[in-house]
């Protein structure tokens, strides 16, 4: 049984790369989960007056679009009659674009968080905020487990993995903020957590941009 599982795992990789069909399935499932929950989270964020939830829903929405880009890059690269098929630049370029998208999102969240700290809302519905954040953490946890496999072997998949990892950290931050608001009435925690999450996203994005740029330069030589 153990040898069979090991064989199945190794069969997903060819020359250090994950099987394209496996990668496409991973990305498709993640897109469905993230996209659906992002809509629900935005609605709850608007109802509860929580910037952290709205920012997180925006982050998840941008991530779903980034994952669509990654899926399209993988699919086009595998088309038998495509001029782009087998082109190593395509998926690496998609990873670079994903990294840039993360920087843009981190900048937006950071700006909104600073505004929220200066002018906090009069009231935030902490219970809906907490329940939604817990559900978001669960959804993102599933996606982290799903996309982690093969991310060390594939730069494009690693970009997708970093997106959902940042989402998971963000969701946990919202949980902490909701608890602080509910127990201590710290309304500023909503903006503070949003700013902290923006910093984490920016760090992962810069790392991804540097790595993908180096890979593109190596391929071009």
Image: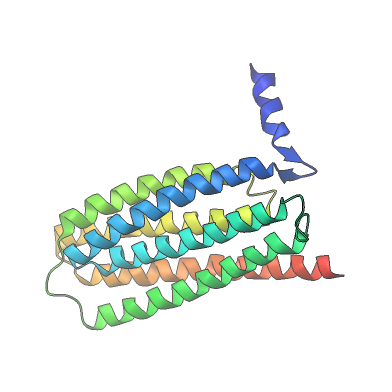
Q: In this figure, which colouring scheme has been used for the structure?
A: rainbow
| Residue at the top extreme, as displayed | 1
Q: Nearer the viewer, residue 181 or 13?
A: 13
**Going 24% across and 61% down the picture, which residue do you hit?**
43
Q: Is residue 93 above or below residue 172?
A: below
Q: Is residue 158 visible?
A: no
| Residue at the front extreme, as displayed | 81
Position of residue 74 measured from the top left corner of the image (x, y, whole percent)? 65, 53
Position of residue 160 measured from the top left corner of the image (x, y, whole percent)? 56, 56
**Going 68% across and 67% down the picture, which residue do you hit?**
93
Q: Nearer the viewer, residue 140 or 92?
A: 92
Q: Is residue 55 visible?
A: yes
Q: Is residue 53 above or below residue 16?
A: below
Instruction: Name the side, left or right, on which 68 lies relative to 76.
Output: left
Instruction: Name the side, left or right, on which 102 lies relative to 129.
Output: right
Q: Is residue 1 above or below residue 39?
A: above
């Amino acid at each position: 049984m153990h040898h069979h599982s090991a064989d199945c795992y190794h069969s997903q990789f060819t020359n250090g790369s994950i099987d394209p069909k496996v990668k496409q399935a991973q990305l498709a499932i993640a897109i469905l989960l993230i996209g659906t929950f992002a809509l629900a989270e935005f609605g709850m964020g608007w109802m509860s007056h929580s910037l952290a939830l709205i920012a997180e829903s925006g982050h998840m929405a941008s991530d779903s679009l980034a994952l669509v880009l990654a899926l399209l890059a993988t699919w086009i690269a595998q088309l038998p009659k495509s001029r782009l098929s087998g082109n190593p630049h395509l998926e690496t370029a998609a990873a670079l674009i994903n990294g840039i998208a993360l920087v843009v999102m981190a900048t937006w969240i950071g700006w909104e968080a600073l505004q929220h700290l200066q002018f906090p809302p009069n009231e935030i519905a902490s219970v809906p905020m907490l329940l939604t954040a817990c559900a978001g953490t669960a959804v993102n946890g599933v996606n982290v487990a799903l996309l982690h496999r093969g991310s060390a072997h594939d730069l494009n998949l690693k970009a997708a993995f970093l997106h959902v990892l940042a989402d998971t950290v963000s969701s946990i931050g919202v949980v902490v903020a909701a608890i602080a608001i509910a127990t201590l009435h710290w309304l500023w925690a909503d903006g503070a957590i949003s700013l902290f999450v923006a910093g984490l996203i920016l760090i992962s994005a810069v790392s991804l941009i540097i790595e993908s740029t180096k890979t593109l330069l190596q391929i071009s030589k």
